[in-house]
Amino acid sequence: MLYKFKSQATADVIMLEGSGQQMLKIIGKEAGAQGVITVEQIPAAIAALEAAVIAHEAAQKRAGRPPAEGEEKPEGDGVMLRQRAAPFIDMLRRAAEAGKDVVWGV
């Protein structure tokens, strides 16, 4: 399943199921087939995503250095939360500036 986030203020942001569910969990939304992030909810969603990125990066630093080229990665696909969240955060910011909601599955 894909999550296709839409807003009248921006281009769509498409994520694979796992990444989409992760973003929704971070912002406190049910990872259902449809949903909406209202203009009023966007500032809290952005703050939650930014806090999660900071916490994730701090955990990565505590866990040690990243694996060198050719070394086995401990888990995950090597994509940082900051990279996954950046397009979604940008969409939320632009939608807030334009006063538009963000929806998915509609």
Image (cartoon, rainbow, N blue to C red):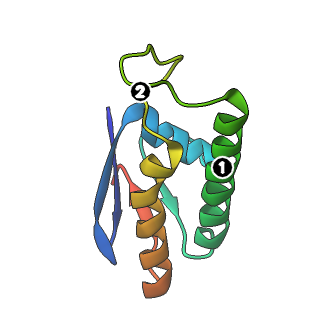
What's under tag 1, amino acid-wise? Answer: Ala
* Quarter of the image with the N terminus in it: top left
Q: Where is residue 28 in the image (x, y as percent from the top left)?
A: 66, 49
Compared with 46, 24 (above or below) is above
Quadrant housing residue 62: top right
Q: Please state which of the two labelled residues, at mark 1 or mark 2, is closer to the viewer.
A: 2
Query: Position of 23 compared to 106: left or right?
Result: right
Query: Position of 12 compared to 63: left or right?
Result: left
What's under tag 2, amino acid-wise? Answer: Asp
Q: How crowded is mark 2: few (under 14 residues within 10 Å), some or many (20 or more)?
A: few
The residue positioned 66% from the left and 29% from the top of the image is: 64
Question: In this view of the protein, can residue 53 be seen by the observer?
Answer: yes
- In the orientation shown, which residue stands out farthest toward the top? 72
Quadrant housing residue 68: top left
Q: Where is residue 26 in the image (x, y as percent from the top left)?
A: 63, 47
Q: Where is residue 48 in the image (x, y as percent from the top left)?
A: 67, 57
Mark 1, residue position = 52
Q: How far apart are marks 1 and 2 (CA)?
A: 18 Å
> Which numbered disc covers residue 77?
2
Compared with 96, 12 (above or below) is above
* Disc 1 secondary structure class: helix
